Every structure is written in structure tokens, then in C-alpha cells.
Amino acid sequence: MRILHTMLRVGDLQRSIDFYTQVLEMRLLRQKEYPEGKYTLAFIGYGDENNQTVIELTHNWDTDHYDLGSGFGHLAIEVDDVYQATDKIRTLGGKIIREAGPMNAGSTIIAFIEDPDGYQIELLGAK
């Protein structure tokens, strides 16, 4: 068994694809419209779906935003250097919500950013 993907509902599909591909350097792996259901699915990630866990972006055509609620925490992405990654993300217009630095009561370097729909993404330094 393995985790295949995590699904996020997004209000503006192209804006989200641009964020994940341009700011976080993922690839758009596939995309398909479902006119009868009035939604589009786009799968993005760092590698092939057969070998990597990816993110499914779901855009319901009649919804432009979602209440994120209080149950979802964040996605986590490992980066070589958290300080460099946050600088680059900031330069590309990404929103930094916690600057790079040691985690609370620990030494692991982390930062938090936010995608266009408000989902939080933790950046963790490579171990």
C-alpha cells in the first residue's frame, strides 16, 4: 500500500496550477474536465504518479472559494535549504506566513507558506 494523492479544492484552477508549478516547481502531470459533473481535476507533483505521492487539485466550476475549516493542518515539502527556498518563493510572489528558522523546541529548520487558496505548506530542511 502507498498514499496516492492528497486532494485540495481550489477556487481558481489556473491560479493554483501556476502557484504549484511556477513557485514550488512541481509539474502538471495530467488534467481532465468532467462537464457532466461540472468540475476539473489536475494532478501535480515532483515525479510520476506511479512512484510518487501527488496533489489532486479539484476545481468545482460553480465555486470560487472554500472555507478551509479547522481540521486540516498542512502539506509538507522537503527542501535543500529553507532560507533559500523562502527567499525564492517570496521573490516569485509567494506568501510567507512563518519565516525560516528553528522549529519550536527543536533544531529542525522550517518555514510556512500559503498557497492562493489559503492552504498552508511547511518547508522542512533536508535531513
Image: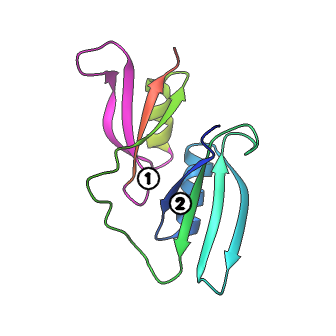
- Check if residue 98 falls in the magenta segment: yes
- Residue 75, compared with residue 19, is above or below; it is above
Extent of the magenta region: 92-118
Which amino acid type is marked by label 2?
Ser
Q: Is residue 13 left or right of residue 102?
A: right
- Check if residue 96 falls in the magenta segment: yes
Residue situated in front as seen by the camera: 3 or 111: 3
Identify the residue at horizontal 36%, vertical 56% (top origin).
118
Disc 1 is placed on an element classified as loop
Residue 106 in picture, x, y percent from top left: 29, 14
Q: Which mark is residue 16?
A: 2
Q: Residues within 10 Å of mark 1 (few under 14, many from 20)?
A: some
Identify the residue at horizontal 53%, vertical 28% (top origin).
78
Identify the residue at horizontal 55%, vertical 21% (top origin).
80
Residue situated in front as seen by the camera: 4 or 79: 4
Q: Are marks 2 and 1 in contact (CB under 8 Å)?
A: yes
Exactly how many numbered labels are in the figure? 2
Which amino acid type is marked by label 1?
Asp
Hey, which residue is sitting farthest bottom in the picture? 36
Residue 11 in picture, x, y percent from top left: 46, 70
Residue tagged 1: 115
Q: Quadrant of the N terminus?
A: top right
